[in-house]
Amino acid sequence: MLLLLLLRENEKRTAAESRLADLRYKVDTMKNQKENAINDLEVQVSELEGRLEESRAKYEALATQKDDELAQLNAQMRNEIAKREESVKEKAAAIEALEAKMKEETGKWNGLLRGKNSEINDLGDQLKTMSAKVSALLKERQELESRNLDSASRVSDLESVVKELQGENTGTNHG
């Protein structure tokens, strides 16, 4: 029994040593990977710093160029504004003249519209009268259709009775 316990203890110790060796190997591997990653990152940082310096120089040159272009555009804009202000003054005078003419024409149209509105109101009254007549005719039509349906139903019933009687007559004639 003691021997069995010693064997089990030995197996446990061997397994623990094996796990310890695996863990040490993994730790060493991780350290190497970490150092490699740090070195790669340092190289990338150096490259990025170089690119940043290049970008700064390009940005400063571009900013200077854009400032010059903006100054030119501002001068052109001032000239265009002056031209447009003159054009606006001319158009405003033309608009005022058109507004005066429009007021005169509006007075004429208002008179015509009043006459047309009166005609429209008369037509509306006529339409109401005609609508009432049409409504009465439609109601009368519905009543006639209802009567026709009743009559058709009665005719159908009578035809059925006639067929039954004819069937009985032919039955008694043959007998």
Image (cartoon, rainbow, N blue to C red):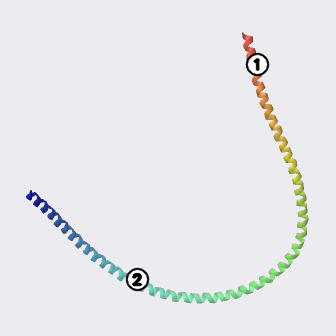
Q: Position of residue 150 (x, y in %)?
A: 79, 33
- Residue at 85% from the left image edge and 41% from the top image edge: 140
Residue toward you, 132 or 124: 132
Q: Position of residue 69 (x, y in %)?
A: 57, 87
Q: Which residue is mark 1?
A: 165
Looking at the rendered structure, which numbered label has been put on residue 104? none
- Residue at 77% from the left image edge and 21% from the top image edge: 162
Q: Amino acid at mark 2?
A: Arg
- Residue at 30% from the left image edge and 78% from the top image edge: 38
Relative horizontal placement of residue 34, taking residue 15 as reference (left or right): right
Looking at the rendered structure, which numbered label has been put on residue 51? 2
User: Which of the image's four quarters has the N terminus?
Assistant: bottom left
Relative horizontal placement of residue 94, taking residue 7 as reference (left or right): right
Q: Residue furthest front?
A: 1
Q: Residue furthest top?
A: 175
The secondary element bearing badge 2 is classed as helix
The mark total stands at 2
Quarter of the view holding residue 175: top right
Residue toward you, 131 or 32: 131
- Residue at 58% from the left image edge and 87% from the top image edge: 70
Q: Position of residue 45 (x, y in %)?
A: 36, 81
- Pair 2/1: label in front: 1
Q: Amino acid at mark 1?
A: Leu
Quarter of the view holding residue 22: bottom left
The secondary element bearing badge 1 is classed as helix
Mark 1 neighbour class, 10 Å CA radius: few under 14, some 14 to 19, many 20 or more: few
Q: Position of residue 117 (x, y in %)?
A: 88, 63
Quarter of the view holding residue 78: bottom right
Q: Image height check: is 44 above or below 76? A: above
